[in-house]
Amino acid sequence: VHRASMLLAPSHFVAETIVERYPHLASHIRITPLAAGNEFKPTPATNELRERAGITSESRYLLFIGRVDDRKNIERMLRAFLSIPESTRANTLFVLGLSGLREDIAAFKQRNERMLRSAAIKTVYSLTTTDIVMLMSEARAFVFASLAEGFGLPVVEAMSLGKPCFLSDCTSLPEVGGKEAFYWSSFDAHHIVEVVQKGLINFDANKTKRSI
């Protein structure tokens, strides 16, 4: 770091974090935001992928993509989703596209065995980029309650596919999601559910206005 003539940071949050620790490097930092790849275009899921994910072409689902990691806050999202009465959920599923170390995934499954047994929760592993594009293309919305991100590339990828994104208001995520995303200011289950329900109504209403 001390010998670098320039430091590239994916977000202002990362840049500010570097400056807090190395104030003398402030003038050397350049912000270089990440972008979705060219492959992120609406793409129907294959039957093979739908079978792996436990969904059909008619399924309505919220989607999370990410590593099994405490900072991703997956368990709070699961609890919040399952707190919604089945009648209100209206057959909406929660699909988790998970990656990570084998031992972390095993521990996650053991810790959340009861919640993962719910028919409304679907988990799928070993996703390729093409798989992610297809799952995002058919998702109702993308949810990402991460506690700490340097950027949050899946958010940009989901937004490039025209999906509403529900994010925590932590670290880099408000910067990445901007005014288009919806944010959780706390992780109370009631608040998480309320933001998603109201956000989907607003998103659909604005989408209708744009199409007129």
Image (spheres, grey):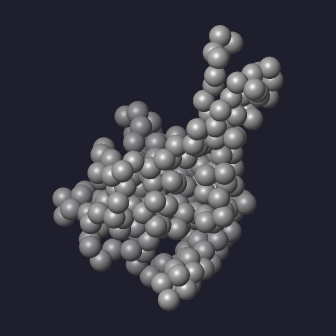
Q: Can residue 114 be seen in this view?
A: no
Q: Which quarter shows the N terminus? A: top right
Number of numbered discs on residues? 0
In which quarter of the view is residue 91 placed? bottom left
Q: Nearer the viewer, residue 105 or 155?
A: 155
Tell me: residue 188, above or below residue 87.
above
Residue 46 spot, x, y in % from top left: 21, 62
Q: Can residue 156 be seen in this view?
A: yes
Q: In the drawing, does residue 199 fall left or right of residue 103?
A: right
In which quarter of the view is residue 45 placed? bottom left
Q: Nearer the viewer, residue 54 or 145?
A: 145
Residue at the spot x=66%, y=51% of the render? 175
Residue at the spot x=48%, y=47% of the render? 35
Residue at the spot x=44%, y=50% of the render? 36
Q: Residue furthest top?
A: 3
Residue at the spot x=61%, y=64% of the render? 181
Q: Nearer the viewer, residue 130 or 211?
A: 211
Residue 21 spot, x, y in % from top left: 77, 24
Q: In the drawing, does residue 109 fall left or right of residue 178?
A: left
Tell me: residue 56, above or below residue 8.
below
Q: Which residue lies furthest to the left in this view?
A: 48
Q: In the drawing, does residue 173 fall left or right of residue 63?
A: right
Residue 100 spot, x, y in % from top left: 41, 37
Residue 127 spot, x, y in % from top left: 31, 47
